[in-house]
Image (cartoon, helix red, strand yellow):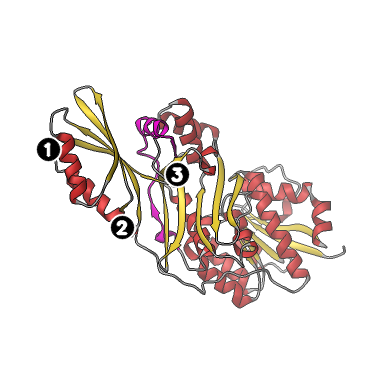
Amino acid sequence: MDRVIRIGLLGCGTVGSGVVTILSREADDITARTGAKLEVTRVAVRDLTRQRDLPLDPSVFTDDPATVVEADDVDVVIEVMGGIEPASGLIRRALTLGKPVVTANKELVAQQGPELYAAALAAGVDLSYEAAVAGAIPIIKPLKESLAGDRITRVIGILNGTTNYILSRMTEEGAAYEDVLADAQALGYAEADPTADVGGHDAAAKCAILASLAFDSAVHGDDVFREGIESVTAVDIGVADRLGYVIKLIGIASESEDRVAVRVHPTFLPKDHPLASVRDSYNAIYVEAEAAGELMFYGRGAGALPTGSAIVGDVIDVARNLLQTARGATESQHRAKPIRPMGELSTRYYVLLDVDDQAGVLAEVAQTFGQHDVSIAQVWQEDTDGSARLVLITHRALEDDLRATVDALNRIDSVRRVTSVLRVEGEILG
């Protein structure tokens, strides 16, 4: 137990502080499990004057992250700065120097993952990123290692705690989106600028990472079709409830016809689906595989200690490999399937229309759906002040056909507005 693995930490905000806390609190057990003591020797921060209640000597802090990477007394680099640069350059430099890297940077891994994997492979060291997706939930290792002998067909998940909190409150309390968002910001679940969460960007980055691993293909964040929850209304929530669904922001990655489809959007999810009961700020990932069948991973998707736990788990693996002059399982793009355009995907849809309350409107609307090869499974009318509301659920249809239908509906004089269009998972209920 005389061996010491020296750690350089890039960033010491919420997650970085969580890492330091866990390494200190669990030091004896970590040493026993690793075969070496893990010691934080360098920490890069933005503000050296800020007071930090951490068990670290002030001398380890610097505002120059490059010196952390280059330091002779750093064996492993942990990156929790976030963003693309300078994180990308620092990680690449660490790998070039033969130093394993552990990162929680979902944006970077989603955008540059294949290139970073190649750099780690060329250097013969580990690049680990369990914390980049779903915080404390172990999903990267299961996809990369535990299920390596299986064929995964689909991954579907609730990948963002902020949006799940908002939609849960809207569902359970009938609250308006704007009011719940304000509460989420006050509680620290959402940033002052919540776009990354509510716009689906965060979930899309995570979905790209999962798709890359599940289907052995290079999937980047820009390959993911994305819609956020900003337009989901209390009316949509109510219709979903009456039909036996809940609305969740879902990331879906699937493989069919030798292509990979990756998308993130609000979805009507049947109440009996395992993901439907995931509420508040929790995350969950549902994996479908040919041999293993259906698997579900559930837990805290963010936070200092949950995310720190995933990072420390990676650091322990990396440290063990260093002691054994080995490296862990690597990523593969050996199947390298192309991305399937969203327009070619087939699913069911919920469509909400505000229309004039007059004879013949429903017939004209139904005819428009039929002209674009979209079959209606359910339809009903609800009267409102001075107009009517049409609610329609379709059979499975191509995305391009549905979009053409919506465009045509917007040109009908008696259709005041196409209010909502959401996708529907599972069989038609209600």
Of 37 and 260, which appears nearest the observer? 260
Crowdedness near tag 3: few (<14), some (14–19) or many (≥20) residues, C-alpha within 10 Å: many
Within the magenta stretch, is there residue 229? yes
Q: Quadrant of the N terminus?
A: bottom right
Within the magenta stretch, is there residue 222? yes
Of 66 and 294, which appears nearest the observer? 294
Spot occupied by residue 418 in the image (x, y as percentages of width and height): 24, 39
Q: Which residue lies furthest to the top in this view?
A: 385
Q: Name the residue under label 2.
A: 343
User: Residues at badges 3 and 2 in contact (C-beta under 8 Å)?
Assistant: no
Q: Is residue 362 visible?
A: yes
The magenta segment is 220-249
Q: Name the residue under label 3.
A: 249
CA–CA distance between discs 3 and 2? 19 Å
Q: In which quarter of the image is residue 259?
A: bottom left
Of tags 3 and 2, which is closer to the observer?
2
The amino acid beneath tag 1 is Asp
